Amino acid sequence: MKIIISGGGTGGHIYPAITLIRTIQNQVENLEILYVGTKIGLEADIIPKEGLPFQTVDIRGLERKLSLKMTKTVGKAIRGVWQARRIVKQFKPDVVIGTGGFVCGPILLAASLMGIPTLIQEQNVIPGITNKLLARFVTKIAVGYQDAVKYFPKEKVVFTGNPIRAEVLSMNRQAGLAEFGFDTNKKTILISGGSRGARSMNRAMIDVHKHFAGSQNIQLLHVTGKNEYNDIVASVQEQGLDLQQSRNILIKPYLYDMPKALALADLAIFRAGATGIAELTAKGIPSILIPYPYAAENHQEFNALALVKRGAAVMIRDKDLTSAGLIEAIESIISEPVKLLKMATASREMGRPEAAEEIAKIVILLADQGLKKLCNDDI
């Protein structure tokens, strides 16, 4: 079986693609993969390190306003389709998958026009512009949220959930507690604004740390992002807080083993990216979500609202974020065991830990259908 997979720009598009690749590799013995991205996206760094064959097309995202730059971008998009067509023609895939980002446009469009089965995986409640345009052409659409179904043709869309790493599911609480040296009798709060951090969240956390320092009931694991780490630690120390003496606060610039952190979390304070939410709900972790306010089409707020609506999370908009408000939100959840349990149950009910396997089955079925069609055409 030969598969092209494309997704780029951000980790939120790339890591689900990698998870899906690993899942299909576990199910198909003789599998050949080609990853298609751009030279300027994160995929150009991440995918070769994963040991996956990688090719690029020259394309950029469309401008929202009419301008000379937009004209040049459209020109690149047209060339990108021809580059993509050449890649597809040379590789001869049985199926082509897109996990998001503008790079998916040319490769999936080219494959669709060539009669090759195609699938897009939409991670957010509000679909991106590329996937909205591709919906008319592709064979199947796998969505991460039930709320996203209404944006796509009914006969093509399947609610699967978002793919998450196998190690997130396999890691247990004891391994997490041992990794970070935390107290087994305290509730653990995990705070992360993503791999690059979130300045507004980090600033709000300074007084939160001061408030909970030395708590007998709560411990905090705060991942600041590498760029923010030194400033946050210095600010905390300026508040007169000795992190070693408090013994219940751990501040890290980055975690290479986030699955262990998720395994011990009783409550998470996160942005509302689709991958992060998928991991939280797969583990049944209640959350305080602070959507990134500049996400395309404000999709993070809609992601967060999907959880709020089902009782799995509370949401604080970035413009409303204060230390006092965050402390109040934490205490209102942690101090009420019944509320915490209900939120955890709601989170778990939303989780789709089997998402990668479901999408892999659809991909394999599409490839089989494409092969049968090819055989019939030859006959």
Image: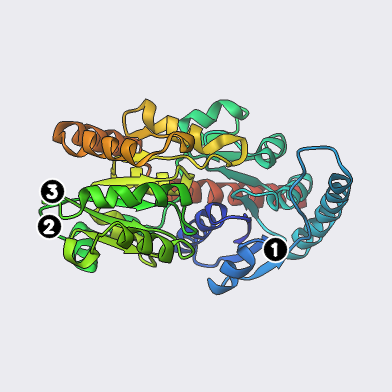
Q: Which residue is mark 1?
A: 40
Asked if the residue under mark 1 is in contact with the one under mark 2, i.e. CB atoms within 8 Å, the reply is: no
Helix, strand or loop under label 2? loop
Q: Where does the N terminus fall, quadrant-wise? A: bottom right
Q: At label 2, which amino acid type do we have?
A: Thr
Mark seen at residue 114? none
Q: Position of residue 82 (x, y in %)?
A: 84, 55
Q: Position of residue 133 (x, y in %)?
A: 72, 37
Q: CA distance from mark 3 to mark 2?
A: 10 Å
| Mark closer to the chain start, 2 or 1 | 1
> Mark 2: few, some, or many residues within 10 Å (few <14, many ≥20)?
few
Q: Which residue is mark 2?
A: 184
Helix, strand or loop under label 1? loop
Q: Quadrant of residue 63?
A: top right
Q: Residue at x 26, y 39 (%)?
A: 330
Q: Is residue 181 above or below residue 343?
A: below
Q: Give the mark toward the camera: 1 or 3.
A: 3
Q: CA distance from mark 1 to mark 3?
A: 46 Å
Asked if the residue under mark 2 is in contact with the one under mark 3, i.e. CB atoms within 8 Å, the reply is: no
Q: Residue at x 82, y 59 (%)?
A: 83
| Mark closer to the chain start, 1 or 3 | 1
| Mark closer to the chain start, 3 or 2 | 2
